[in-house]
Image (cartoon, rainbow, N blue to C red):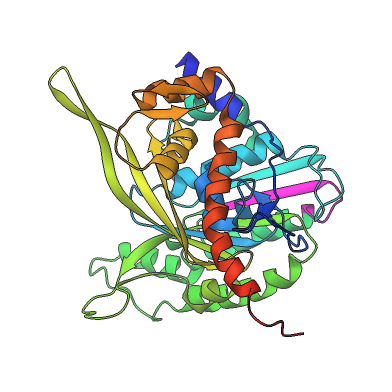
Amino acid sequence: MARVIKRRKRVIKRRKLDSVSRDISGRKISRRKERVDFISSGCATLNLALSGRIDGGWARARVVNVVGDGSSGKTLLALEAAFWFFNNMIGRKTKVFPKPVKKIHIVFDNIEGVMDFPIEEMYGEDFVKAVEWKRSRTIEAMGSNTKKYLKLSRKKGVAVLYIVDSWDALEARAGLERIEDAMEKEDGAVKGSMNTEKQRYASQYFGHMSGEMEGCDFTLFIVSQVRTKIGVTFGKKTYRAGGKALDFYTHQVAWLREVEKLSKVRKGRKIVFGIRSEAKVERSKVAKPFRDAEFTILYDYGLDDIGACLRFLYGPKEKTIKWDGEKFKTRKQLIKYIEDNDKEDILRQEVQNEWDSVEDHFIAEIRKRKPRY
């Protein structure tokens, strides 16, 4: 455990990486004017899929949404974003937010009321104490709470990350009263509305919040569950609740799926120690959409950023890897070498370069076209 804790402390350090891209001829490509800052996902490859930048991630001061089924890593990604926010936001200055952050609020609105992660071991007692843990029973209560923290974010130097986990567990007050009333009766029948109050509230809520969030350092991170369409024979068979409001007002939407369970045999027993998941960015207003990334979750630890980077560069199969002038027969040896010698930045830069080499091929094709102005 001592080495794991050491590794996580290294991961959270703020890094300044080379942000200059080059096309296939080696010519520098100037970046567009920065209009959005980012909150790291905790994983370099996922940052690239979300924002095209190794130092990017979730869009800061926007509405972002992660969607997935059970055990795909939704809550873990929310915790990783909160952990980065906790360790890196104080004193942060960017072109988008030139005033340094002096105070942060991390709110984890745990609607489901369950938190099975050993978060003290994974992220430390200081992080757990810093997070403001809430449980809004209704969508109206959630709306009231987010409005309160939105007002705090209007103060200079105050940044807020508000996590809703999960959107599906929210119920309208009227619907909650109906089910509570029905459970008190013998027949148990739920009477009244078709349960449209939540959808109506959501439509008005997001419309209001989108205007109120302008100019505020307030990030709304929404976790959603995957649902399955019954009887569908063509097209997409899954969806997430929230109606058109979440479709329209979100700036990033990442869909997660579990790819495989990671296991090893010890003393004759097969033990699952983590999962490999895939994120597909199906909506993005801050970068190119429809990018994907794989990431690994290790139980009782969190995202394995180094492992994800090595898989991106060298594929899934175990093999001898030449890196930094050395040969490594296993990835376990290479990971230890990277950690012991503080080589994480070099590895991430290689991932950025590899990502850019693919993206720049398409940029070069566009640059061959006749200018439109």
Number of numbered markers: 0
Closer to us: 289 or 250: 289
In the image, residue 167 lies at what x, y percent? 48, 61
In the image, residue 214 lies at what x, y percent? 77, 66
Please give left or right for residue 332 compared with residue 283 in the image. left
- Quadrant position of residue 90: top right
Image quadrant where one finds the N terminus: top left
In the image, residue 178 lies at what x, y percent? 40, 70
- Quadrant position of residue 117: top left
Image point (52%, 42%), residue name: 43
Residue at the far front in the pictured view: 25
In the image, residue 83 lies at what x, y percent? 59, 37
Q: Is residue 217 above or below residue 230?
A: above
Point out the stretch of residues depicted in magenta: 152-163
Q: Is residue 144 visible?
A: yes
Closer to us: 369 or 176: 369
Asked if the stretch drawn in magenta spans residue 342, the answer is no
Image point (69%, 73%), residue name: 208
Image quadrant where one finds the C terminus: bottom right
Closer to us: 58 or 306: 306
Q: Is residue 133 visible?
A: no
Please give left or right for residue 159 compared with residue 320 in the image. right
Closer to us: 43 or 183: 43
Residue at the far top in the pictured view: 2
